[in-house]
Amino acid sequence: MRAIGDPKDFWSGVFFIAFGAAAIYFAWQHPLGTAMRMGPGAFPVLIGGLLILIGIATLVRAFFRSGEPIERITFIRPGLILLSVIVFALLLAPLGVIGATVALVLIGSAASQKFRVSSALALGLGLGLGSAAVFGWALGLPIPILGAWLGG
């Protein structure tokens, strides 16, 4: 057997295959339907099959290319992204969509090596105001623009 030349491609292929198999497994519980009248399980099974094919191609390619070894995996940056979403959900009612979006962007931006508070704050305010304009005022969704803590 040939040695793995590109570990990143190898593990990417493994993950594609695993996610594709999981999609097919969970979608198989729903009716597939026919080609003319597809059921709720048809599209996830199709996407799962495509993920498996992409995974196989990526996995095979790993044996014929050389690549860099995988560096040490840290969970700080993905953890900050996850934390930003959780904080957004927790702050939506008390701070409203503007304040929660600012918090989301500030925490999520801290995961970047190029993080600057001033640019993250400006982006957060812009996205918060844009979200309030689109979802709150234009579409009339029942989300708090200014939360209870801000008198809204």
Image (cartoon, rainbow, N blue to C red):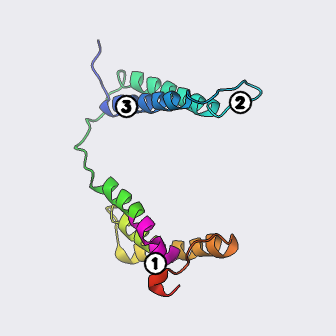
Q: Residue furthest top?
A: 1
Q: Is residue 40 left or right of residue 105?
A: right
Residue denoted by label 3: 9
Q: Tell me where residue 73 appears, x and y as whole percent.
A: 25, 45
Q: Is residue 43 above or below residue 83?
A: above
**Mark with earlier residue (3, 2):** 3
- Residue placed under numbered mark 1 in the picture: 95
Give, as a three-letter code, the residue at label 1.
Answer: Leu
**Residue 105 image position (x, y, % from top left):** 42, 68
Residue 44: x and y, percent?
58, 33
Q: Which residues are magenta?
A: 87-100
Residue 110 in magenta stretch: no
129 to the left or right of 19: right
Pointer 1 local density, CA inside 10 Å: few below 14, some 14–19, many at least 20: many
Q: What's the distance in space between the residues labelled 3 and 2, CA to CA?
A: 34 Å
Does the rendering let one see residue 69? yes
| Residue type, numbered disc 2 | Met
Residue at the disc numbered 2: 38
